[in-house]
Amino acid sequence: MKSETDQFWNHRAKTEQEIAKVNIADTVQRDHELQFILKNLHPSMRMIEIGCGNGYVSQQLREKVASLDSFDYAENMVERARKAYGETNNRFFHDSVLAPKNAGKDYDTGLCVRVLINLRDLEEQKLAVRNMANMLRPGGRLILIEGFKDGFETLSAARRAIGMPELAPAKINFYSYVRELMPEMLEHFVIEQTWHTGLFDFLTRVVYPQLAGADNAHEPGAFHQQIEPIVRANTLPDLAIYARLHGFALVRK
Ligand SMILES: C[S@@+](CC[C@H](N)C(=O)[O-])C[C@H]1O[C@@H](n2cnc3c(N)ncnc32)[C@H](O)[C@@H]1O
């Protein structure tokens, strides 16, 4: 049974015209994510992409690896991806991370970006982590970038302190705390690298609305482009507490 969130994505594949914005409106955030993803790829890799959306990222990944299998639970996303990009050293297919039937095994690397927040609850998120682990060879790597509740709370506190409304996560998404998902991750993986959007989120969710007015700061705009070099050049680990998204390079045990 498809959830409302599943239906949202299937619908969006048909309705958002701009190819770069089908799976995220904020292209600066996406480029920031890609920085972490691409540095972890190698031309010899056999790769699987979990929740590939309309294939916008897939077409960049396939140029960096030997082969790429990409799947999504939204049929319309898979169809749009195939139509837009075709299949070269890659294929697009329909599958669910909750009950994979068509995904292969023993991949060198897997990628999953902002997919778990679209599942129903923590139990489904844990199942997804387990299923992704089973797609990889021992020593293979999962690059996981996911939204968590922690950063929303910290950003909301920073906003409250200056009289700004709290930051509300999108209604279609389910967020867990990092500490809730971590035991399942550590059951199957060793954490090799971490990444976060703390600096980006503090600038776009606290500084930008303070400059532009909270009511005028819902959409990404020129401010996001202007801060892109700052975010690209600085990691600032202390700002991880403000991160809506955390990234992990996880090595399969
Ligand atoms: C926010 S989009 C991210 C897409 C892509 N990873 C990206 O970075 O552009 C989330 C995607 O996850 C897909 N998705 C949701 N539940 C899924 C599931 N159970 N199995 C596979 N994909 C799923 C949605 O259909 C949607 O295309």
Image (cartoon, grey):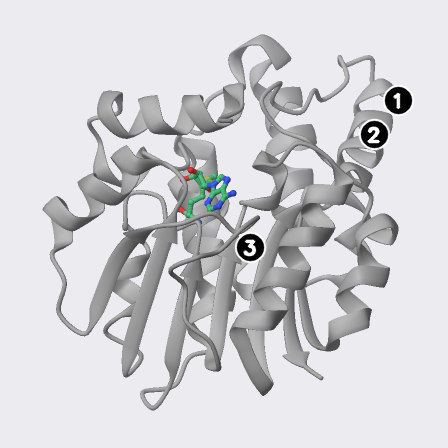
Q: In this orientation, which residue lies closer to the viewer: 10 or 28?
A: 10
Residue shown at the point (77%, 54%) measured from the top left: 240
Q: Are marks 1 and 2 in contact (CB under 8 Å)?
A: yes
Residue 129 placement (x, y as % from top left)? 66, 59
Q: Are marks 2 and 3 in contact (CB under 8 Å)?
A: no
Q: Where, by quadrant of the figure, is residue 206 drawn?
A: top right
Residue corresponding to mark 1? 161
Residue corresponding to mark 2? 158
Number of residues whose C-alpha sits closer than 10 Å to that of mark 1, classed few (under 14), some (14–19) or many (20 or more) = few
Residue 15 appears in the rendering: yes
Residue corresponding to mark 3? 231
Number of residues whose C-alpha sits closer than 10 Å to that of mark 3, classed few (under 14), some (14–19) or many (20 or more) = many
Task: Note whether 109 is above or below 131 in the view shown.
Answer: below
Q: Tag 1: residue type?
A: Ala
Q: Tag 2: residue type?
A: Ala
Q: What's the distance in space between the residues labelled 2 and 3, CA to CA?
A: 19 Å
Q: What's the distance in space between the residues labelled 1 and 2, CA to CA?
A: 5 Å
Q: Tag 3: residue type?
A: Val
Task: Note whether 215 is above or below 41 in the view shown.
Answer: above
